[in-house]
Image (spheres, grey):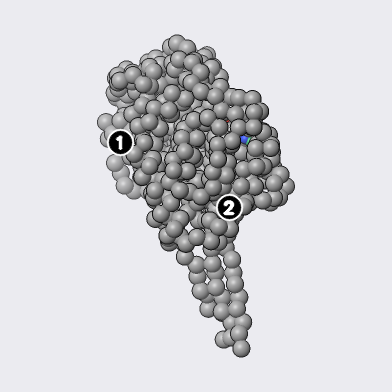
Amino acid sequence: MDHYINGEWVNSGTGTIEVTNPATGEVIDTVPFGGKKEAKLAVSAAHDAFSGWAGKTAAERSDCLMRWFQLIQKHQEDIGEVMTKEQGKPLREAIGEVQYANSFIQWYAEEGKRVYGDIIPASASNKRIFVQKQPVGVIAAITPWNFPAAMITRKVAPALAAGCTVVVKPAEQTPLTALKLAQLADKAGIPPGVFNVVTGNASDIGEAWLEDARVRKITFTGSTEVGKLLMRGAAQTVKKISLELGGHAPFIVMEDADLETAVDQVIASKFRNAGQTCVCANRIYVASDVAEAFTEAFALKVRELKVGNGLEEGVTIGPLIDKAAVDKVNGQIADAVKKGGQVAVGGHVTGHFFEPTIITGATDEMLCMKEETFGPLAPVATFDTEEEVIERANNTPYGLAAYIFTENIGRAIRLSEKLEYGIVGVNDGMPSVAQAPFGGWKESGLGREGGRYGIEEFLEVKYVSVAFK
Ligand code: ADP
């Protein structure tokens, strides 16, 4: 497949990137290895399209988004299949991601009609103060491989609804899902230049966008390391920036928790996408009194998970994305064992297929309790008091998602207020939805995606002071 720039499929012959299936190692397609030239071409297209798109009524933009939403709905199974092939997640989960991704398009198609301003009482009777919201301009979105569709729509849908135009660089591992979305955007009648996708050399494309004053905002999901680099680069032209970076979610099970719910939710949170999400439970803290009961029930359920090629029926955990991901999880397990942890379940790996693994006797000195894992490893540690667990949970530079399981409402409120995290799930391991603000505190990022907060990221505030006779 080629770049999608200005409503056309473009290939300037700059070499290719092979897209491989992590389950089989087979090359499934190639995309162009674009660089600065293609990146700039896309910005020019987005820049030229901006005034026309921003000048449409919110209802007209909403109609375009709704047509895109309907086409994605219709093609959810084929997009899901492409996603499973390039990313590895089980087909049912991939189709689930397409639906989740599409919910942002639908929600922002509606929300774009509700971008309101203010009229503020002035200081003189012959003056009026109007506050209006206007689209930021050309947006550059750089997205990761773990959610090949949703990380794009979460950015592109609010941006387009607000009247911005967008250039996207998907991850090199998963460009096909992005290009599939572009095909449908084209078919939906989203005008040329409004939504562009460029594939290729990440640092060259990133640099071209950072240098270009026409790009007014960078929105990024990915590693904290690259996020910091983009933040520094954005200073050149003082671009707005939204960052959705790493997480290290604590999953806290109090002694009064409903253990069945806690086990079901930790499975959903920890093993979704084979543990490759930034809101996955990373550290599991269980009250000492219930640790044995919890771990027993958890181990039973983990043994029921089925690892394999995501296209096969009944598979619940697909392969990890690449060898580096496998090595990282292996390294964390070896480190945990060296520091006294026990492998209670799993621990084996074949190719990219990693067995879901539970480590008991985890301590905060272990790498898996400090570094983001991004794989199916669940370390279980114990604690004795509320104060202790809050202190341990907050003792990290990350602040994306945290989870608490308790049946005591006072405790739920107390703990959720003390956790230094942008998202807290109380008895809920799967809190992400289109209408809620997703984003992190501390080094987990800046800005929010989702809900009415998410569209503000793509709007500038203009204060108009009118004096009259
Ligand atoms: P991961 O480790 O999950 O792959 P990355 O932060 O490396 O996370 O990747 C997220 C996105 O950032 C991908 O689209 C990747 O191509 C892109 N990326 C990586 N390095 C750079 C860079 N130097 N400049 C711009 N984008 C980059």
| Residue 73, above or below 339 | below
At x 59% / y 69%, what residue is drawn? Answer: 463
Label 1 environment density (alpha carbons within 10 Å; few <14, some 14–19, many ≥20): many
Residue 145 percent across, percent down from the top left = 51, 30
Residue 138 percent across, percent down from the top left = 60, 50
| Mark 1 lies on residue | 257
Residue 152 percent across, percent down from the top left = 49, 40
Q: What element carries label 1?
A: loop
Residue nearest the observer in this picture, 189 or 335:
189
User: Looking at the picture, which amino acid does disc 2 mark?
Assistant: Ala
> Does the rendering let one see residue 449?
no
- Closer to viewer: mark 2 or mark 1: 2
| Mark 2 lies on residue | 49
Q: Earlier in the sequence, mark 2 or mark 1?
A: 2
**Quadrant housing the C terminus:** bottom right
Residue 301 percent across, percent down from the top left = 30, 22
Q: In which quarter of the image is ligand 1?
A: top right
| Residue 155, above or below 365 | below
At x 72% / y 47%, what residue is drawn? Answer: 236
User: Looking at the picture, which amino acid does disc 1 mark?
Assistant: Ala
| Numbered label tally | 2
Residue 171 position by quadrant: top right
Residue nearest the observer in this picture, 219 or 79:
79
Q: Are marks 2 and 1 in contact (CB under 8 Å)?
A: no
